Every structure is written in C-alpha cells, then in structure tokens.
Image (cartoon, helix red, strand yellow):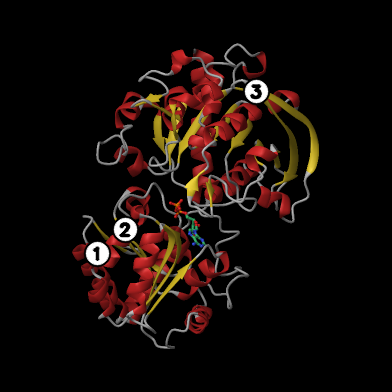
Amino acid sequence: MDITYVSSEVVPFARTGGLSDVAGALPKSLQELGHKVYLFMPLYKKIKQGPFKLSPTKGSLSIPMGNKTSTGLVYSAPLPGTRISTYFIENTTYYDREGLYQDPATGKDYKDNCERFSFFSKAVLETLQVLGIKPDIIHCNDWQSALVPTYLKTLYKDNNSFRGTASLFTIHNLSYQGLFPKEDMPLTGLDWSYFNWKQLEFYGKINLLKAGIVFSDIITTVSRKYAEEIQTAEFGVGLEGVLRERTVDLYGVLNGADYSVWNPEKDKLIPANYSLKNLKGKKACKQHLQRKLKLPQSDAPIIGMIGRVASQKGLDLVMECWDELMKEDIEFVLLGTGEPNIEQALKSAAARYPGKASINIGFDNQLSHEIEAGADMFLMPSKFEPCGLNQLYSLKYGTVPIVRSTGGLADTIDASVGFSFQSYSSKEMLETIKKALKLYRDQSKWLELMKMGMLQDWSWEKSAREYLTLYQKALAKVKGA
Ligand code: ADP
C-alpha cells in the first residue's frame, strides 16, 4: 500500500507531545511491514537549525489564501534511522517561528493558525501531485491536518490524482479542536455553504477537528476506551453527537511504545543499563537521579511524574492531598511544563518539603529518561487520557504505574502490572498510592510486579497491523462509493 502520513509534529524533527512520538514511530512499523510510507510536516525554524540534511525537491507551492497567494518550497530528509522520506512544507511567514502552535514568550496560540494549517493541508495535496505520488491512503492527525480529508471530499473531489484515495483521521486528544472565528472561512478556500452545524460550524465558530470527523472515511482515536468515552457528554467536549453519528466508522487503536528509544537495556540517556534478568543498573539509576535532583540517597520509593502541566493530567488531585502525601516515606519527582499557575502552585508546595520533592519545570528529554529509569513508581492520575505513553515506558523500565482508570490507562494497566483507581478523587488516589507503598515494603512481591510489567510487549507492530486493516476498510468504502 502507498501510505501518506500527515502530522504537524514528528519526532525527532519537532515535538510538543505524544502525537510526535506516534508520528515518528508508526510510519517505521508500517514500512517494516512492507508498505511504502511518505511523511509530511511543516518546516519549522527549529528543524532548519537542527542537524538534519534537507534537500530541495521539485515541489514549489503557490496557493490562494483568501485574497492573497502564499508561496513556499518543499524540502525532504529521511526520517532518521529509516529510508522514509519526510517532506517539509516551507513558508517562512507561517513556520519560521519559535513555537509550533503558540508563541512561547506569551503562551498564546498564534492568531493565524487557521491560515497556517489550511496552507499546510493544501500544500500536502499539491505536493503529492507534483511528486507524482498517488497514495492509497492519507492518514491525518488532529485538527492541524483535518482539512486534508475535508479537501479530498470537497475541493479535490474530482481530481484524478486522488481517485481511489481514502482518508483515515486520528484524534489524539479531543480537547484540542482547532476553533477559529468564522471570518477565517475564506482562508480555508472552502465555500461558505460548508459553514453549517452538520459540517464545519461549531457554535458560530469554525471547528477543524469536527471537519476531520465529518469528512474522513475512517476515524480512529488512540485507545478503545477513549473511543467509547468520547461519544458521551462527559468526555465528548461538545463533539459527542458528531462522533455518535459516525460510530460505525470510529475505532480505537492503542499507540505503541517505540522500544528503539525507550528500552532500559539500550537507553543511552541513562547512567546504567538494566534488564529483566539483571536489575542492578536500576538501583544505579535511582542513585543517579537522587544525586542529580539533590534528594537524599535513601531507599524510600521515588514517585515520578512526567507530562504537560495541564488540568487534564490530574495535578489538582496531587495538590489536594499534597501534605498527606508528603507524610509518607517517599521522594517525589515531577518534570513538566505548561500552565504557569499550576507550575507555580507545584513549586511552592515543593518548597515546603525540601529534600523530599523535586519539581522540574521545562521540557527535558534527558531527564525524562532518567526519571523513567530511576523512579520506583510512576503516577498518572489523569482526568482523561486518550492513550498515554508514559505508563507504557514505565512498564518497560520496571517503574510501577499508578493510574486513574480512564482512556488508554484503563486499556493498559490492570492489577497484574500496576495500581489503578476509578473515581477522580484525591482520596481514592491517595489510598491507591498507600496500597502501592505497602506492597513496596515486601520487596519480593514488588519485584514480581515490576517484572510482570517489564515482560509486556507494547511495541508498535500490533497497532500498525490494526491500522492496515482499517486502511483496507477505508479503501473499500471509497471503492464502494
Ligand atoms: P500528551 O500527548 O497528552 O502530552 P502522552 O503521555 O501521550 O501525553 O505523551 C507525552 C510525551 O511527551 C511522553 O513521551 C512524555 O515523556 C513526553 N513529555 C511530556 N512532557 C515532557 C517534559 N516536560 N519533558 C520531557 N518529556 C516530556
């Protein structure tokens, strides 16, 4: 199959979160299974400054955007460690900026995001034609590329280059919808007739995620549980009705873990490697983490957390029972960046417990590996979690997950490998942590639990095969139409 994979971020080129990890790994797996894959993403400033060797292509873009025309070039580079061509859409006005979607200086979304990603989506379809690539399937992700399937069914509907091309659209997080004022409509190039409540309109605004849901042949999200949850008012963020309309075409496919990056046996970012058979290195990793973060070199279990500092991640539960938690014989390590008020609250809470809690604000890949390896437990009390990746990494690193049972966390963590709680309450969370601490005191039982997790295989291959089945379904739909 010829597969075109479109994502606004791909590791190692550009990364703000889970989507980029997926976009850097799934195409690799698809190619290993014998398929031809092309990747598309915008050419951000950081990529130009990076170590990547970009080559020009014959792609040259000239796209009408409202009452002007925007131009750009297309570069390519192999996805490191593979022979997959990644095509970078260049337009200096749109992408030569410090952030991907937001100005890091203000934390505010760029005002022209609708324009930036409309251009990107059209540029993908234009470039495919220039390069003579006729994909069987175009796999798009989140609101940033949601207009690709929309264009396929509208502006490019009669274009011969895309006859028989099907689309699959993956929602990585329903709470980021790409909402824009209706005045941006001309920039999308779509006729105003599409601005209605069945298609692009959402309470008077343009909703790009909704467009992706409405126009794609198949829709997926990143766990079975989340696929069910988002069809309810509690998790649907206003789109539950639209999703229920498409329930027969909506599937959950769990993300995998990229074990070429996240594997304690080979990880170059941790001070000592270890494996199921020889766990000695894990102790060295713990001591290293304690030294690095100026925590006492004690045997008390380290509870780790890594992630965006956002209300989704359940940090309010941690704050609610903070003093109770700090009474326990533990050390607490957090790495994250996000909402400034939550960051501040965490920092002042930790300041009251020097030598016990270490709050690290920032995005730090090195430290994230050191925490996965050095911590004993990994806490994810998310309010909702489409898939979650850190619990999968934690399993591999023998760092026992403690999770709230929602979305992908519910699909991956059961009592055989970790601890989970149901209701979103700090009381339940604390009780569950205490259960874990109790078991930790019985080191032989704890070791058994760790090893059960380390034995599990959450690699991409199984999920890649599920996507291939869905690509076939999408193709059959297009052929049948
Ligand atoms: P989400 O996509 O909701 O942010 P995921 O768990 O799916 O959450 O993926 C987040 C990814 O980003 C993980 O690989 C995690 O390790 C990484 N990550 C998040 N925050 C940081 C940070 N501050 N420093 C380093 N890595 C981070």
For the view shown, which residue lies furthest in the bottom direction? 297
* Residue that label 2 marks: 314
Mark 3 and mark 2: Cα distance apart in space: 44 Å
Which numbered dot is residue 429? 1
Residue carrying label 3: 68
| Percent x, y of residue 382 | 33, 55
- Is 477 located above or below residue 274 in the figure? above
Q: Is residue 339 left or right of residue 460?
A: left
Indicate which disc, 1 or 3, sits on the residue closer to the N terminus.
3
Vertical side of 377 occupied by 216: above or below: above
Q: Counting residues from the N terminus, which is met first, the one under dot 3 or under dot 2?
A: 3
Q: Identify the element where label 3 is drawn.
A: strand
Above or below, 337 against 90 in this view is below
- Residue nearest the viewer, comparing 437 with 213: 213
Q: Is residue 150 visible?
A: yes
Contact? badges 2 and 1 (CB < 8 Å): yes
Q: CA distance from mark 1 to mark 3?
A: 54 Å
Query: On the rendered image, what quadrant is the N terminus found in?
Result: top right
Which mark is nearer the camera, 2 or 1? 2
The residue at the point 55 percent across, 55 percent down is 258
Judged left or right of residue 160, residue 241 is: left
